[in-house]
Amino acid sequence: DQMQLGQPTQGSRPEESGLSILDYLLHATPTIPDNMGIFLGTTYRMHSAVNQFISDAIYEGKLESAPDNDRQRIQVPQHDQGILNVEAGIISIPVAHEGNTQASDEEVEEIVTLAHQLLGRQYTEKNGTERAIDWDDMLFMAPYNHQVNKLKIALGERAHVGSVDKFQGQEAPIVFLSMCASNANESPRGINFLFDKNRLNVAISRAQSMAIVVYSPALLETSPTNMDQIAMINTFCRLIQHR
């Protein structure tokens, strides 16, 4: 999938010889045209409340969620009025912090709190089976290894923590994405890395039921320097505003 992350390679290759087949044929085109092939337009992973963003922002509105996917939901405790009082979807949680570039203790603290709130809630699988949520039902991701290490320490050995790249191809009922940086313009690998559309796609689309994005509100005030960065920031803003 040319809209996800490429496989890491070693060595250099001339011109476009290192591209995947889809990268070479389609370049930046999100979906394959009818005259060139067949687009597999159904996801059997994501609840429609998660897939709606992925479809609209990444795949030109052409990706549909299989009907059975919507059985995948998290039971909300009675009288719960908190931020996690939804059965499925994308939840964006702003956490104010300053001066962080590759890691944020503030975001780590918030994620630990949210994870423990979700542990033990009832989860309904696609086949209708109900069970309690445990650590194996959650993936914790961050774009920077510094934040990954902080999350590992705070969450403990049972938590599945890694970079976005590490979890490509995997899935879980609940996904956490920590954006880490206080200000994208000051992040060491720059706007193009932090807001990379393919990386956001991979992170959010791991979720079967719920994706939780923890971020600094200042990221929404990022100053782009070119049209590509404007598009990246726009995608991130759409993610944060998705309901």
Image: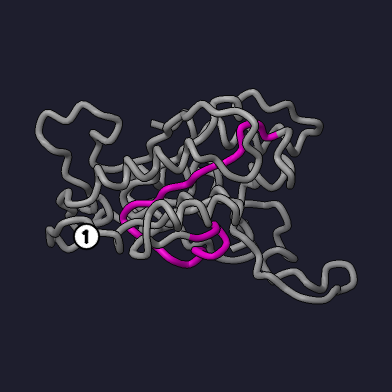
- The residue positioned 12% from the left and 58% from the top of the image is 130
SS category of the residue bearing label 1:
loop
User: Residue 180, how many percent across, how many down?
Assistant: 56, 41
Above or below: residue 92 compared with residue 188: above
Quadrant in the picture for residue 212: top left
Of residue 4 and residue 170, the one placed in the foreground of this image is 170
Magenta span contains residue 159:
no
The magenta span reads: 162-184
Q: Quadrant of the N terminus?
A: bottom right
Q: In this view, does 12 lie to the left or right of 108?
A: right
Q: In this view, does 222 lie to the left or right of 57?
A: right
Q: Kindly identify which residue carries mark 1.
A: 126
User: Residue 161, how many percent across, how many down?
Assistant: 45, 59
Above or below: residue 201 compared with residue 13: above
Residue lying furthest front = 153
Of residue 16 and residue 60, the one placed in the foreground of this image is 16
Above or below: residue 137 compared with residue 122: below
